[in-house]
């Protein structure tokens, strides 16, 4: 007989900021968090693909989610970080304004994604997380980085 522990129903999210909004991604997809370093720019790629970096022998494409989500006045400072994600068979880095914490959310804490979103297509949202007074936009980062428009990332892999 399997005993279901209520605590096991929660899922942990890494919370990061883009502008004034807080986003959450599944912590299990996160490999590491690094400071933003210069990257090698690749010609003829969209502006949100910053380029690639060499991470311990692995060529990692770097995507700036701030540019992808059409933020204005994107600046790089000491708070800017790269979240290195391990997504199935590839490693990708995403640039964000900062990382705040890791939160465990239960299904009761998560509301369905709205039918509209100003900065992000709702097909990439898993829902909205309510944590106290905070509203968190929960992103299916695997879907976002596997979408057709992101297929360019695959072309950046150097074999």
Image (cartoon, helix red, strand yellow):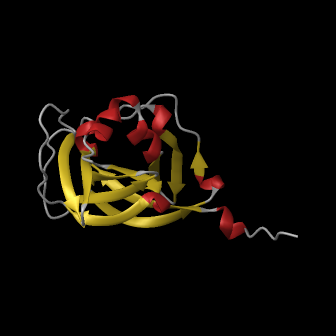
- Identify the residue shown where x is 45% and y is 45%: 142
Image: 51 above or below 35: above
- Quadrant in which residue 10 is drawn: bottom right
- Identify the residue shown where x is 24% and y is 49%: 62
Which residue ends up furthest to the right in the rendered image?
1
Does residue 96 appear in the picture of this structure?
A: no
Q: In the rendering, at what x and y percent does residue 140 appear?
A: 48, 45
- Identify the residue shown where x is 24% and y is 54%: 59
Image: 82 above or below 56: above
Q: Is residue 132 left or right of residue 49?
A: right
Does residue 15 appear in the picture of this structure?
A: yes
- Quadrant in which residue 146 is drawn: top left
- Identify the residue shown where x is 20% and y is 63%: 79
Q: What count of labels does the image hold? A: 0
Q: In the rendering, at what x and y percent does residue 42 appear?
A: 14, 40
Q: In the rendering, at what x and y percent does residue 118 appear?
A: 36, 31
Q: Nearer the viewer, residue 23 or 83?
A: 83
Q: Nearer the viewer, residue 91 or 68?
A: 91
Q: In the rendering, at what x and y percent does residue 44 appear?
A: 14, 31
Q: Quadrant of the N terminus?
A: bottom right
Q: Is residue 62 left or right of residue 120?
A: left
Q: Is residue 94 left or right of residue 148?
A: left
Q: Nearer the viewer, residue 95 or 134?
A: 95
Q: Is residue 27 left or right of residue 1?
A: left
């Amino acid at each position: 007989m399997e005993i279901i522990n209520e605590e096991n129903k929660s899922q942990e999210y890494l919370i990061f900021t883009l502008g004034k909004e807080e986003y959450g991604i599944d912590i299990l997809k996160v490999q590491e968090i690094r400071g933003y370093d210069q990257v090698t720019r690749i010609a003829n790629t969209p502006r949100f693909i910053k380029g690639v970096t060499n991470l311990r022998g692995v060529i990692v494409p770097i995507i700036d989610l701030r540019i992808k989500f059409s933020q204005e006045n994107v600046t790089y400072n000491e708070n800017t970080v790269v979240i290195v994600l391990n997504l199935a068979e590839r490693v990708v880095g995403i640039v964000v304004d900062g990382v705040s914490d890791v939160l465990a959310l239960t299904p009761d804490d998560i509301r369905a994604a709205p039918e509209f979103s100003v900065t992000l297509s709702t097909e990439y949202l898993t829902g909205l997380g309510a944590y106290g007074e905070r509203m968190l936009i929960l992103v299916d980062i695997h879907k976002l980085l596997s979408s057709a428009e992101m297929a360019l990332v695959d072309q950046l892999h150097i074999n």
